[in-house]
Amino acid sequence: MNETGLSEEEIRKILNDSKGKDLKYERVLSSMCTYPHKIAIEAHMQFIESNMGDFGLFRGTYNLEKEILSSIGDLLHKTNAVGYMTTGGTESNIQAIRSMRNLFLQSPEYQKSASNGQKCARPNLVVPDSAHFSFDKVSDILDVELRKASLDDELKVSVESVKSLIDENTIGLVAIAGSTEFGQVDPIKTLSDIALEKNIFLHVDAAFGGFVLPFMEKNYEFDFKLPGVTSIAIDPHKMGLSTIPAGVLLFRDSHQLESLKADTPYLTVSTQYTLTGTRSGAAVAATYAVMNYLGKAGYRKTVSRCMELTDYLLDKLAEMDIHPLIKPVMNVVALEVPKCDIVRSRLAKEFNWQVSITQNPHGLRLVIMPHVSFEMIDSFVSDLKKVLDT
Ligand code: PLP
């Protein structure tokens, strides 16, 4: 920063140059984010200064947040679920597990052993091996041991493996509704039964799938309709077409949210449940705007188009004898491609395509987001063919 500022024109030039170096989503097949809807952008700009960290000053935005929570609660079969808008899946996952851990540490059994001077065992959390890396951060931040359950042939978590990892220090389970790498949905009904039987929490990470599954023809059981599900992460800034940063965390019961309470003496509100202090009211307004503009029918249309494109891509790839590792459940495709790391870097270097790689099993991963078109798929498939042929 210089002593005297630059002119508006100079700033605009720098920004335009920088923006020019950003990739356009039209070459991106690796991201779970996309262009926000026009109405979301408009709302975001209108509420740009709104701070939900001090929502006593921004009652209007706060009311929008309450309406979003109730709509998403309704979508996930619990209208009176409690929670708040986060910065995205990572924060939602951290806070959901923090609540589990806090309640575990406050439990009479734990308190009793602590007061007897016994060395207390480290709480543990059982997650699918396919869990997003945010759970590694969770483990580090919250000092909770992460126990990774293996996957079955369809890349869903193995129920037997989950069961074998649970012990008296297990604070809860995590299930994924739309895994980051494969878009797969875990056997959440069975995990819900196990959570109830063992009297432990069950968090569903639907950061991606939350705005996909409710709008598909097939009925997936993944939400609060299952009595063992105690919290859900769902991200409007992914398939919800809102602006970044927009995540939502919902709890079944208010005592879970209460366990996150912190006093905030110098604000207009006396307590906070959130991880961050200052929070974007702009993303709240954007989320309200796009959800109410599109309605369920609008999201159904978006999801159905993404699935149509996914099927179109798979048909084209089948002609080249390239097949998915599993039949895609949603608009995430992991492909069996030989030497996929090299293929990925050549696609980027020679054709400017961004795709990603799945770790285990190893595959070429594509996410068919709403910015993808039939022309984009034709062009990608043709470039992939060139890479594979030479
Ligand atoms: N959970 C899942 C299943 C995800 O796919 C992602 C991101 O892709 C996250 C959590 C993290 O979300 P964010 O990047 O918004 O923090």
Image (cartoon, rainbow, N blue to C red):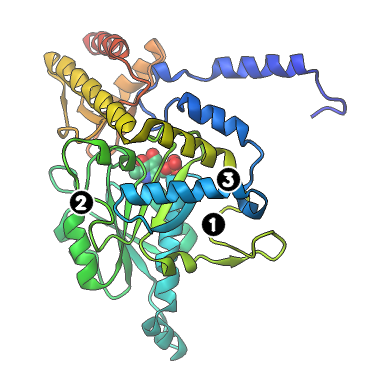
- Of residues 350 and 265, the one nearer the viewer is 265
Q: Residue 74: percent from the left, percent from the top?
A: 33, 50
**Disc 1 on helix, strand or loop?**
loop
Residue 135 location (% of width, % of height): 39, 52
Residue 367: in sight, yes or no?
no
Q: Quadrant of residue 139?
A: bottom left
Please give left or right for residue 273 compared with residue 303 in the image: right
Q: Specify whether residue 382 is in view.
A: yes
User: Amino acid under label 2?
Assistant: Val
Which quarter of the frame holds ligand 1? top left
Q: Dot 1 surroundings within 10 Å: few (below 14), some, or many (20 or more)?
A: many
Relative to 385, is 133 above or below? below
Task: Give yes or no for contact between labels 1 and 2 (Cβ–Cβ under 8 Å).
Answer: no
Q: Which residue is mark 2?
A: 157
The quarter of the image holding the N terminus is top right
Give the camera-side residue of 9 and 271. Answer: 271
Which numbered disc flags the more N-terminal residue, 1 or 3?
3
Do the residues under discs 1 and 3 have CB atoms within 8 angstroms?
no
Q: Nearer the viewer, mark 1 or mark 2?
A: 1
- Image quarter where the C terminus lies is top left
Q: Amino acid at mark 1?
A: Thr
- Image disc number at residue 274: 1
Which residue, given by chain and number where applicable, does mark 3 sit on? 61
Position of residue 56 measured from the top left corner of the image (x, y, whole percent)? 65, 55
The foreground one among 347 and 213 is 213
Please state which amino acid type lies under the numbered disc 3. Answer: Thr
Instruction: Count neighbours of disc 3 (C-alpha within 10 A) and say few if under 14, some if 14 to 19, many if 20 or more.
Output: many
Q: Secondary structure at mark 2?
A: loop
Circles 3 and 2: CB atoms closer than 8 Å: no
